[in-house]
Image (cartoon, coloured by chain):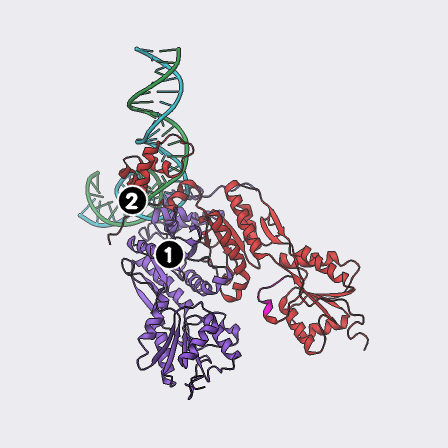
Chain colours: A red, B purple, C cyan, D green
Amino acid sequence: MAATKRLTQRDIARLAGVSQATVSLVLNGAVSAEGRIPQETRERVNKAIRDTGYVADPVARRMAKGLNRILGVFTYEPAFPSAQADFFTPFLLGIEEAAQELGYDLLLLTGAAAGAQRKIFGNNTRLRLADGCLVLGRKFDHDELTRLVAEDYPFVAVGRRDDAGGPVPYVGGDYASGTAALVDRVRALGHTRIAYVGPSHGAESTFDRWAGFSGAIAGLDLVAHIPDVAQPAAQTLESLLASGATAVFFIELADAIHVETLARQRGIAVPEQFSIVVLGNHIRAEQTGRRFTSFSIPREAMARAATEMLVRRVEHDEPIQQILLPCEPLEGDTLGPAPLTKPKTRP
Amino acid sequence: MAATKRLTQRDIARLAGVSQATVSLVLNGAVSAEGRIPQETRERVNKAIRDTGYVADPVARRMAKGLNRILGVFTYEPAFPSAQADFFTPFLLGIEEAAQELGYDLLLLTGAAAGAQRKIFGNNTRLRLADGCLVLGRKFDHDELTRLVAEDYPFVAVGRRDDAGGPVPYVGGDYASGTAALVDRVRALGHTRIAYVGPSHGAESTFDRWAGFSGAIAGLDLVAHIPDVAQPAAQTLESLLASGATAVFFIELADAIHVETLARQRGIAVPEQFSIVVLGNHIRAEQTGRRFTSFSIPREAMARAATEMLVRRVEHDEPIQQILLPCEPLEGDTLGPAPLTKPKTRP
DNA sequence: ATTAGCTGGTAATACGCATTAGCAGTCAAG
DNA sequence: CTTGACTGCTAATGCGTATTACCAGCTAAT
């Protein structure tokens, strides 16, 4: 149980009867000194390495070279609590897979919590430990983003982000097109009076949905827009019915569930009398027993793409890119043809 | 958009009109030079730091001091795929929380995958980047464990582990006692003929359950032991019924679910005619609609304790410890009093 | 015999920080 | 006015690696 002293290249060098520099050269394939070191010497060095089980200290490596094949992962909310888990898990999965394939390790920046809201720039920002960083979260801190951009530290956001003193590199989901496609579908099914439940501004993801929506509703009547998401379902349902809408777009799955449940209780058939569309898929939606018509968010693919983009940025200094992945429509069973008689409008 | 060159202490020193050493001293609270640096100088340095947003490079820090407040997390299987997620998530949650409280960041060692099975010791072990490491997984590689122990690298296993050329530091669940307590409960309910479905050896967790089981069944008849877990439920159920057992212990929740479902289909009431006990709780068990009698596995607490132990080991060179946390019984509704007439034994 | 070119290496240095030894200046005591 | 203690700071060094510049020894060409 002899406390094995840390092995260094110097130790290997001594064993192999060469210099530390030679060990390093052998270790690194030494392109610049390709034919320089004969097979025999390599053998001796490699033998010493094998015998001792030496591995280069990654810290020193990074010190010397400036890179360490580590990607930071910053989440604006703790990643694992079950409340968040459903949100982050697919992203983390994609990141982990891509990182593994690319030979990178992941540094979870959990330490830098400043009160309730997490901060990238705490006193002790360890961000720099990593070669680059992926940033996730529902809501970003704009000032921090600005600073990240300004410092031109290599990072990639998962999810589209507005400019922050410059373009932000990201991989997001094309919510706007996804939403627009659903609008088209609704139109094709004969609906003319539609409603929208959810804010039209706020986070980028919210904004994009509204943008896609409002850009696609030509020829349709937006008879109700209920921006307040938190209000009771009964009230929402009342407003919707009163408006004469036959198809409603929800930003929040939760709202859709409440309203649908309530509608069913009141004997209003979905989608026969009333169609519901949710703007984005959500894990655990199946539990409700109802498969809402919506579009898919390719979370895993987004994360993978973001990771790969980050690595390209780190390794090849690739310029900033912004990518939106398509969000395919999900059939579901809450969108049907427009009813011939509008519900409750002609008593 | 001037590409901000990486700031170093030398830059700060220049700005504050002091030496790099002074900056470092100010930065580190400098116990040894407590009163040595006057407030005024500190102010100047701190101002420069504030103005520039300087943060010390953790790599250099680690280089110089040997520690960097990073904990490695090695999982023998990918952590986030949903199949595994249910297994790892509670652990990761506990680790993340504890790490955050203790001011550590987490390094996910994903990179060193060698084929299907992950390896701690790849060519390029990055393990040492962290101050210490937590090791998780259903199945450990014994040789790697041996090596970890031999190198006396600070690590802690989550889950009990057999000696590997020396005691392995771990925080585990006390499956043996948890199992024994369930056996006692079964006995107290009047059962005399019992069965066990699952192997008696293999991973430590399996072994412990069997050990707890076989050590507690004095006075009971073990009328069936079906070590093969993968066989069809019908066959298992046949064997169990044929044996005349009135209470069955399952290692695998999945088996229990299949058998219970089948039993119900055949009109055999659980637990009236037939009691089922599962050795350990499992996330997502609720989805089956049946709450199986079992014991809880305090995964989050285990992970927290392991993290704290690791930090003590790193910071204070604490000697190796082995801790088992109690697994409390879970009432459930699949364990009842022994039936007066054994099912199907007297046709 | 001198030079040029090649082979097989090595010495030296940088990376950014922590830490230790020690230096110049001041002030009080002797 | 010398000594000693103290104050406020800095120079120097080490951590383990990657990399560059360079050197010794040899051969082949001039």
Location of mark 1 (residue):
B133
- Looking at the image, which is closer to me, A340 or A221? A340
Q: Horizontally, is A277 left or right of B193 in the view?
A: right
Q: Position of residue B143 (x, y in %)?
A: 33, 55
Label 2 neighbour load within 10 Å: few <14, some 14-19, many 20+: few
Q: Quadrant of the N terminus of chain B?
A: top right
* Circle 1: element type: strand
- Looking at the image, which is closer to me, D13 or B246? B246
Q: CA distance from mark 1 to mark 2?
A: 24 Å
Residue range in magenta is: A279-286
- Residue B71 drawn above or below residue A149: below
What chain is tagged by disc 1? Answer: B
Q: Are marks 1 and 2 in contact (CB under 8 Å)?
A: no
Q: Position of residue A71 (x, y in %)?
A: 48, 50
Q: Residue furthest front?
A: B347
* Circle 2: element type: helix
Q: Residue furthest right?
A: A346
Please check whether the numbered discs 1 and 2 fall on a single chain: no
- Residue B250 drawn above or below residue A88: below
Q: Position of residue B168 (x, y in %)?
A: 31, 61
Numbered mark located on residue A51 in the image: 2
What chain is tagged by disc 2? Answer: A
**Disc 1 marks which amino acid?**
Cys
Dominant SS in magenta? loop
Queried whether the magenta region covers residue A100, the answer comes back as: no
Label 1 neighbour load within 10 Å: few <14, some 14-19, many 20+: many
- Residue B307 drawn above or below residue D9: below
